[in-house]
Image (tube, rainbow, N blue to C red):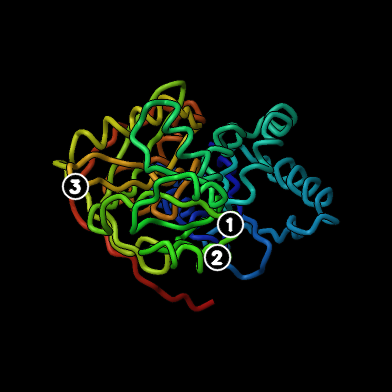
Amino acid sequence: MNKINVLVTGTGSLIAQAVIKSIKASQLKDKIKLIGYDYFPNTAGSFWCDKNYILPDILKPQYKEEWRKKIFEIIKNENISMLFIGLDFELILFADLKEEIEKETGCRVIVSDKNVLEIGNDKYLTAEFLRTNNLNYPKTCLIDDIENKDIKYPCILKPRAGARSRGVFKINSEKELKNRASSVNNAIVQELIGTEDTEYTCGILYMDGRLVNSIALKRKLKEGNTFLAEYKKDYSPEIYYYIKSIAEKLKPFGSCNLQLRTDEEGKPFLFEINPRFSGTTYIRSLFGYKEVEYILYKILGYEPEPFELKEGTVYRYYEEKLV
């Protein structure tokens, strides 16, 4: 049979590389031709693809239309069947283009609706989403409203939009909050829940109007990224009920990543939604949570294999490649 052409964007990112590695480890690997692109040459992920493009910088307004034309050109010329997004800032762009791309080319774009992305991209809207849906949420307020709120210390100061723990500070006093506030752009103040030892990174896979599967991993961070993840089958059922409830209210498309902590009573509190694949996507696949493979099977019309999860610990480490 002819190979299925799949496009993965941002081959220099951890997210794209996790998707690529998941595809190359899947049962469909010999049936797929991998096409990638990035904005810089010689990314690690580009060497794992059969072909890689360099695109004009979409972050520069003068290249916006050129970027759009290049996307359609790649999809049509390479006969792309499915597009996976590896860069955060491209999510909204592809959500806007999704209907047009799918109608004009037949390529399926794996991206959630724009309203889901907006909830995930804004930490204040994330907390409001939880609050309005009667789900556990860390008390959260805008920095301009702190005088009207009862702030308990220590608390968390962080930007409404951000990733990988950048600009996130643990604040121990009112004085420290005032000193730090001006250094965080568009800041929010949030209740501190639990500790680093009660933090989980969770995956949900939501398709065809239902939660297909979910996984909760205990994790440890280094420079904002997971370097150790542990899965056990006896993690609290309350965590799984909680993330199922979030999935049913949020209704993402495909894979979605949730960050949460549990409090002293073991109750889960979400503090971040990433409505996209995660840098831990390949890590999760090693536990048997093969979300990328499932999506490939489902979109291509094959019967997906059931998930068979296994306990263990995954360590992330650097490796080198001579080109």
Q: Amino acid at mark 3?
A: Glu
Q: Amino acid at mark 1?
A: Asp
Residue plotted at (19% across, 34% down): 237
Q: Which residue is mark 2?
A: 47
Q: Which residue is mark 3?
A: 264
Give the distance between the C-alpha atoms of the residues marked 3 and 1, in whole angstroms. Answer: 49 Å
Neighbourhood count class around disc 1 (C-alpha, 10 Å): few under 14, some 14–19, many 20 upward: few
Identify the disc placed on residue 15.
Answer: none
Q: Secondary structure at mark 2?
A: helix
Could you tell which of marks 3 and 1 lies nearer the N-terminus? Answer: 1
Residue that sits furthest to the front in the current view:
147
- Front position in the image: 85 or 79: 85
Taking 1 as reference, is 285 left or right? left
Taking 68 as reference, is 318 left or right? left
Residue that sits furthest to the top in the current view:
209
Q: Secondary structure at mark 3?
A: loop
Residue plotted at (69% across, 43% down): 93
